[in-house]
């Protein structure tokens, strides 16, 4: 039994909330299946329905898979906003504040569980991509580099969704706000080169955070010049990650402290 006068260590405290979030993920099988199946369905649609029109050479699957990977991460991470908002509105935070634990770690638990869940989902999407013709040319080092960029992106967008869940008034509102972010890959080089877009849209597509992340993953996995893409990708991720953590911590302190 935990002492009422002494808080458990930060590490133990974190593991408790991570385990809680993982158990919730295992129980919510429908959400996990949808996070995996929706990107797979989009990949199959773009590969077999639109792929021939976009790239008659039959190599479109190699182009589109990096974008699908980020879509998978986005769909999977978006549930974090709903989960965090649910915790903030159902009274559980009030219960945590009466216990000798650091209740802010409930957010960390959601983030770490989402990272693990989405890395698994991403692995499944990559396996399906290989079955439908994806043929990466990456070396072991390039694979590890791509996985590192993907993990950093998942961590970043999960913290962003966590912050959105904290500021949303209801879980439904949190899901709505998060859904807006999921449109960003469609305004990037995920499905078509930005050079094919109207001039006014090219500037948006080329200078938003998703495009350099996709171009980095694409270059690492199927060949091409990484150039400055990787530095822009890492820079964007770190900037958004830091701002999201600060936003989440400030909002949680303000909301939890006012209860």
Image (spheres, grey):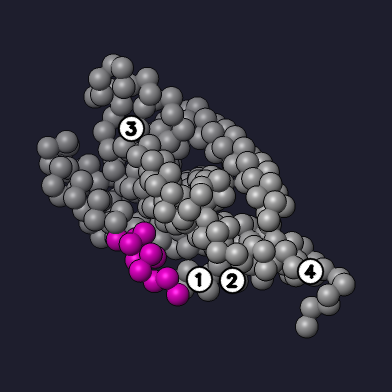
The label number, if any, that marks residue 187 in the structure image = 3
Element carrying mark 1: helix
Q: Which of marks 4 and 2 is nearer the N terminus?
A: 2
- Asked if the residues shown at circle 1 and circle 4 are in contact, with their CB atoms under 8 angstroms apart, the answer is no
Q: How far apart are marks 3 and 2 (CA)?
A: 36 Å
Which residue matches tag 2?
A: 20
The residue located at (35%, 69%) in the rendering is: 30
The residue located at (22%, 42%) in the rendering is: 60
Q: Distance between the residues labelled 2 and 1?
A: 6 Å
- Asked if the residues shown at circle 3 and circle 1 are in contact, with their CB atoms under 8 angstroms apart, the answer is no
Q: Earlier in the sequence, mark 1 or mark 4?
A: 1
Element carrying mark 2: helix
Q: Which of marks 4 and 2 is in front?
A: 4
Q: Is residue 112 something that shows in the picture?
A: no
The quadrant of the image that shows the C terminus is bottom right
Q: Earlier in the sequence, mark 3 or mark 1?
A: 1
Q: Which of marks 3 and 2 is in front?
A: 2
Q: Nearer the viewer, residue 8 or 165?
A: 165
The label number, if any, that marks residue 24 in the structure image = 1
């Amino acid at each position: 039994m935990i002492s009422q006068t002494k808080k458990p260590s930060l590490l133990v405290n974190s593991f408790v909330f991570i385990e809680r979030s993982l158990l919730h993920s295992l129980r919510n099988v429908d959400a996990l299946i949808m996070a995996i199946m929706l990107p797979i369905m989009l990949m199959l649609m773009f590969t077999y329905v639109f792929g021939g029109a976009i790239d008659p050479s039959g190599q479109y699957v190699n182009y589109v898979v990096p974008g699908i990977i980020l879509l998978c991460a986005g769909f999977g991470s978006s549930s974090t906003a709903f989960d965090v908002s649910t915790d903030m509105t159902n009274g559980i935070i009030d219960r945590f504040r009466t216990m000798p634990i650091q209740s802010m770690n409930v957010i960390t638990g959601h983030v770490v569980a989402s990272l693990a869940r989405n890395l698994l989902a991403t692995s499944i999407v990559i396996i399906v991509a290989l079955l439908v013709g994806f043929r990466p040319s990456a070396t072991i080092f390039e694979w590890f580099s791509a996985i590192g960029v993907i993990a950093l992106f998942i961590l970043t967008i999960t913290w962003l969704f966590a912050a959105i869940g904290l500021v949303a008034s209801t879980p439904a509102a949190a899901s709505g706000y998060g859904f807006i972010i999921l449109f960003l890959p469609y305004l990037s080089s995920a499905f078509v080169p930005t050079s094919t877009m109207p001039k006014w849209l090219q500037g948006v597509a080329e200078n938003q955070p998703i495009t350099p992340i996709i171009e980095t993953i694409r270059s690492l996995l199927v060949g091409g010049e990484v150039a400055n893409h990787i530095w822009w990708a890492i820079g964007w991720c770190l900037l958004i990650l830091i701002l999201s953590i600060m936003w989440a911590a400030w909002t949680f302190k303000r909301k939890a402290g006012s209860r």
